[in-house]
């Protein structure tokens, strides 16, 4: 998995871990939209991520002051975060829960065709934000077929995350809790087995004592 694929996977893992967007604060929703817009913008814009985030935040400040934001800010407000969240929950979380899921229909008009006056077929890239969204979904559909499967659910907090190698927990905190819980379970099993052996030995000793009498 390359850097771009991991970034895409980590964004959708975050979405898949959120039960409801309404439960988030406004600032958290804005940051999610900003991250989504960054992923989309990279498809077609020469701006670096740092430049884009700087412009997007400037547009957001304008919007809060009642001023008209620039094109980036307008696109940021119009992003269908709800659709991306629904897709992540239904597909990624559904797969991790052992369900059978259906991929959404995806259309990718990647080229614009036009017949030239000389009768030759010309083509150019079809650059637009809506189709960039379709491209993200298409890339995620391909990512789902990556081996090993790129998503995992944390056994402690149930969050969806993108593991590194054999990583089992989403964070050091959950790892500490998980290891502690595993040790408790192992200790209970050990004590249960130990006490069962002691009771068995005590019964056998009692039988031998009765026979000797």
Image (cartoon, rainbow, N blue to C red):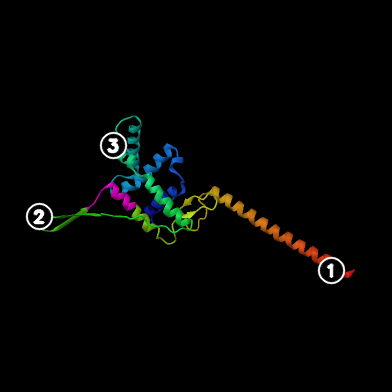
Q: In this picture, is 26 found above or below 199?
A: above
Quadrant of residue 56 in the image?
top left
Q: Residue furthest right?
A: 213
Q: Main secondary structure of the magenta part?
A: helix
Q: Nearer the viewer, residue 166 or 25?
A: 25
In-front residue for pair 163/202: 202
Quarter in which the C terminus is drawn: bottom right
Which residue is rendered at x = 73% and y = 61% of the image?
A: 196
Q: Residue at x 80, y 66 (%)?
A: 204
SS state under label 3: loop
- Which residues are the magenta region? 125-136
Dot placed on the residue nearer the N-terminal end, 2 or 3: 3
N-terminal-most mark, 1 or 3: 3
| Location of residue 153 in the rendering, given as x and y in whole percent from the top left corner | 49, 53
Q: Secondary structure at mark 2?
A: loop
Residue that sits furthest to the top in the current view = 65
Local crowd size for mark 3, using a 10 Å CA cut-off: few (<14), some (14–19), many (≥20): some
The residue where tag 1 is placed is 208
Position of 45 relative to 196 (above/below): above
Circle 2 residue:
117
Say the numbered circle drawn on residue 70: 3
Depicted 52 relative to depicted 143: above or below? above
Check if residue 130 falls in the magenta segment.
yes
């Amino acid at each position: 998995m390359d850097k771009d694929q991991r970034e895409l996977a980590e964004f959708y893992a975050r979405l898949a871990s959120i039960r409801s967007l309404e439960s988030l604060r406004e600032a958290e929703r804005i940051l999610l939209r900003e991250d989504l817009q960054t992923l989309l913008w990279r498809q077609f814009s020469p701006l670096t991520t740092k430049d884009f985030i700087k412009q997007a935040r400037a547009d957001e400040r304008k919007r809060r002051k009642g001023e008209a934001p620039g094109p980036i800010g307008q696109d940021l407000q119009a992003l269908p975060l709800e659709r991306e969240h629904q897709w992540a929950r239904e597909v990624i979380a559904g797969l991790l829960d052992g369900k059978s899921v259906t991929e959404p229909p995806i259309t990718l008009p990647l080229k614009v065709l036009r017949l030239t006056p000389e009768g030759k077929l010309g083509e150019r890239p079809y650059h637009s934000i809506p189709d960039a969204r379709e491209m993200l979904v298409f890339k995620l559909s391909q990512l789902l077929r990556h081996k090993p499967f790129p998503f995992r659910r944390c056994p402690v907090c149930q969050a969806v995350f993108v593991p590194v190698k054999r990583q089992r927990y989403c964070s050091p905190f959950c790892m500490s809790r998980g290891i502690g819980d595993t040790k408790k379970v192992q200790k209970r099993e050990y004590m249960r087995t130990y006490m069962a052996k002691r009771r068995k030995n005590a019964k056998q000793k009692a039988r031998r004592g009765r026979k000797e009498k």
